[in-house]
Amino acid sequence: HVQLVESGGGSVQSGGSLRLTCEASGISASTYCMAWFRQAPGKEREGVAAIDSDGGTSYADSVKGRFTISKDNAKKTVFLQMFNLKPEDTAMYYCATDRRRCLFPLSKTWYNYWGQGTQVTVS
């Protein structure tokens, strides 16, 4: 079965950086769409970044130029490098995937497999 495990969250000051990691099992990161979402308390889960099997990427406008998504196909791992973090980036960050390409990369309804999340707090 598909399992996604996130790590790398933490507490940082405004302007700081973090790198999130998502380790996948039961699915090939090289073949399917992988994405990061986030959800702040009282808000909808929103798409942050996605990476397709061909390496194509998509980003939410709010993180363009500050976040970078990448992957290591051999290790079935997806990363989210976050720079210049702001308090509004505070949220639980989730890794997501499904057995298909990124047709709607930042839509939460496109994905059926989710990790448990890792908390990012920016003060």
Image (cartoon, grey):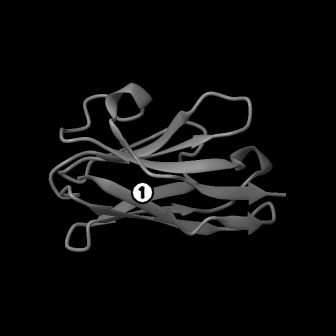
Residue sitting at the far front: 1
Q: Foreground: 71 or 112?
A: 112
Q: Residue flagged by tag 1: what amino acid is it?
A: Ile
- The vertical placement of 73 against 58, above or below, is below
Q: Position of residue 49 (x, y in %)?
A: 44, 45
Q: Position of residue 112 (x, y in %)?
A: 32, 36
- From the image, which quarter does the C terminus lie in? bottom right
One can see residue 70 in this view: yes
Question: In the picture, residue 100 is in which quadrant?
Answer: top left
Q: Residue at x 26, y 45 (%)?
A: 33
Q: Position of residue 94 (x, y in %)?
A: 50, 49
Q: Foreground: 78 or 54?
A: 78
Residue sitting at the far right: 123
Q: Secondary structure at mark 1?
A: strand
Q: Residue at x 68, y 57 (%)?
A: 120
Total marks placed: 1
Q: Residues within 10 Å of mark 1 (few under 14, many from 20)?
A: many
Question: In the picture, residue 121 is in which quadrant?
Answer: bottom right
Q: Foreground: 32 or 27?
A: 27
Judged left or right of residue 40, residue 116 is left
Q: Residue at x 26, y 37 (%)?
A: 102
The residue indicated by pointer 1 is 69
One can see residue 107 in this view: no
Residue sitting at the far left: 31
